[in-house]
Each structure stands twice: as C-alpha cells, then as structure tokens.
Image (spheres, coloured by chain):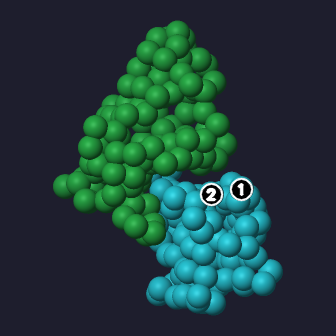
Amino acid sequence: GENVEQHPSTLSVQEGDSAVIKCTYSDSASNYFPWYKQELGKRPQLIIDIRSNVGEKKDQRIAVTLNKTAKHFSLHITETQPEDSAVYFCAARAAGGGNKLTFGTGTQLKVEL
Amino acid sequence: DTAVSQTPKYLVTQMGNDKSIKCEQNLGHDTMYWYKQDSKKFLKIMFSYNNKELIINETVPNRFSPKSPDKAHLNLHINSLELGDSAVYFCASSQGQGGYTFGSGTRLTVV
C-alpha cells in the first residue's frame, strides 16, 4: 500500500519568513495530493491540493509543488503569520484505492513573533 | 449549518464498556470515512463507505463495527473498550475523487 513520509516533524520560523514542508510517497500510481491544516483541538481542514497532471499550484501565500519522477511534493508558506501556527498534514491517494487518503505524520509549525 | 457533524464530542468510559459514535453529513457526498488520530497526531483510516456499501476495511479489531443506514450517516460502534482505544475519532466525507471534509472529532477516553 501507499506510504507517505513527512519532514520535518517540527518547524519554527520567525513571523514573515517562509516555511517549507516536504513529503515523499511510495506508490507511483498516486494521483492526488492534498494538504490539511489542523489547529489545536480542531478538525483537519483542506488548505490546498494538487493533482498528478500539474507541477505547481498557488493560492495567495501558500503553494504546493509536485515532482512525480522523484515522488516528492512540498508545501510552501510565504510571509508567515502567527495564525499559520498549526499541525500540517500531507496526504496521497493511490489510483483505484477507493479515494483512500494516506496521511503523513504531520509537521508542527510554530510562527514566532 | 455544520457540514459534517459528530456526536458526542467527548466520551469518557470504563474499560469493557460498549459505546457508539454517530456521524452525519449534509453535503450530499457519496463517501464517508472513519479515521483514528492517536496521541502522536497520526491519522489512520479505519473504514470507508460509498453509498452505504463498505469499500475500505483496514486492519481494525473486529470490536469496531461501522454501520451506514444511508449515505448521509455513518456510525461506529465499539465493543469491549480497551485503554488503547483512547484517541480522537474523525468522521469525514467526500464526493467522487475530491478532498475530504472532516467532522469536529470525538475524543474518546477509556479509563
């Protein structure tokens, strides 16, 4: 089955700096890669996603890049703000897997003033 | 209007008891899921139903039994609760090959 690795597990940045979180996946047939943000005590919420026919997608301060050859995808947050502090999860969906998402282990992002 | 709602939000119970968690979605999605989030925040799929039909059943003890009376509802019944069952259980739904919408979670504590 699909295996998703996520790094780093914790990330601390100064307000205004950029943050990058990286994930790798094992199943070359995976075709959908969402990112979720989970604030303390809250539900995971979809913030951006990318499909395998696209190499990059941007939405205001967040962007996701996908390298299918290397089976890597990354989340980039620019001009970080304190409200960006949360746990971020990447996920991958293998084709034919019944829309099952396999999640990475999460990255605790802390944006310091 | 809450899109995916779970009840109860908190559940504290003794070992050996049987408990149920309920989930309802009003998004018209065709697929619903149960995920378990452990103390290290790891999200692991347990079950998935598509239009009331079980399509994903991961390696979960058979003390856990899901039920989907219709495509808007997915319940989880747990028999003979153990300490290791303590976690946050999230319901989610999706339409087609889209992303998930999660419920607010049920924090289960077994004492």
Furthest-right residue in this view: A70
Front of the two marks 1 and 2: 1
- Give me the residue at 60% from left, 41% from top: B58
Chain colored cyan: A
Q: Which residue is mark 2?
A: A102
Distance between the alpha carbons at the discs numbered 1 and 2:
9 Å
Q: Of residues A39 and A67, which is closer to you in this image?
A: A67
Q: Would you say B84 lies left or right of A43 here? A: right
Instruction: Point out the image quarter for the N terminus of chain B.
Output: bottom left
Q: Quadrant of residue B62?
A: top right
Chain containing mark 1: A
The color chain B is rendered in = green
Q: Secondary structure at mark 2?
A: strand
Q: Secondary structure at mark 1?
A: loop
> Answer yes or no: do the residues labelled 1 and 2 have beta carbons within 8 Å?
yes
Residues flagged by tags 1 and 2 on a common chain: yes
Furthest-left residue in this view: B1
Residue B24 shows in this picture: no
Amino acid beneath label 2:
Thr
Q: Which mark is residue A1?
A: 1
Amino acid beneath label 1:
Gly
Q: Circle 1: is it few (<14), some (14-19), or many (20+) Cα within 10 Å?
A: few
Q: Would you say B68 lies left or right of A37 here? A: left
- Give me the residue at 27% from left, 55% from top: B3
Residue A28 in percent (x, y) is at 73, 73
Q: Circle 2: is it few (<14), some (14-19), or many (20+) Cα within 10 Å?
A: many
Q: Is residue B92 above or below residue A77?
A: above
Chain containing mark 2: A
